[in-house]
Structures are given as C-alpha cells and as structure tokens.
Image (spheres, rainbow, N blue to C red):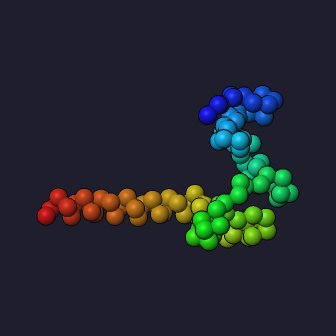
Amino acid sequence: MICIHDFGAVSAGKMCVLWAGPTPRVMIWDPDLVKEIFSDKSGQFKKPPVNPLIQILTRGLTSLEGEEWAKRRKIITPAFHLEKLKVIFTYISTAALMSRINNSVH
C-alpha cells in the first residue's frame, strides 16, 4: 500500500490515500473535515459498495445512505448525549467492581 500524506490542499487537513489494488481509499483524521463529511446530506460523499450478504446481516447506521441514514441517526443520537453516557459509565463501573469483589470472595 502506498500512503501519500497531506494529499491535496494543506488547509483541508491531514489525509492519506491508500491503494487497495486499483481502488483508492482516502483516510481523513481532521475532526472538522470528518464532521463535515458525516453531516453532508447532498450525497456528495458516498460509502463504498458493500457485499450484499454483509448488507443483509448488518443493516446498521454504517451501511445506510441518504434519508434512511439521517432518520436512523436522528433516532440514536440522544442515546449518546454526554450526561446519559456518564450514567451508563457509572453502572458499568459499579458492575465491574461488584464482579471483582464477588470473584475475590469466592
């Protein structure tokens, strides 16, 4: 694989082009650019084609496009609000601590 750092305009942030055989893949790790791509509703940024069997087995957010993606994303976004994640983390931490205590007693 060939990796070309800072491909394109420097102001676009850091990007890397990877060639998987004849197919180019662009990796982006600039948070602002990633946010722009994920919030794009014009259809300008398309996901690569997915194996039909995989698509049937994984009908999640990552495999959806357009309106269906936006609808599903709107539904799940509230679950990832910081305050809700703090509560979930507290429960998980408590369960892990209780498990360790239980295992050390036995």
**Relative vertical location of residue 62 with respect to residue 34 in this rendering, above or below:** below
Q: Position of residue 20 (x, y in %)?
A: 65, 41
Count of numbered labels shown in the rendering: 0
Q: Residue at x 65, y 31 (%)?
A: 3
Residue 65 placed where, x, y %?
75, 63
**Does residue 14 show up?**
yes
- Is 79 situated left or right of 75 in this image? left
- Residue extending farthest right: 42
How far from the left and from the top, in percent, is residue 74? 71, 67
Could you tell me which quadrant the N terminus lies in?
Answer: top right
Q: Position of residue 28 (x, y in %)?
A: 69, 40
Q: Is residue 60 visible?
A: no
Q: Residue at x 21, y 64 (%)?
A: 102
Give the camera-side residue of 85 and 76: 76
> Which quarter of the figure has residue 4?
top right
The residue that appears at 71% across and 41% down in the rendered structure is 22
Quadrant position of residue 91: bottom left
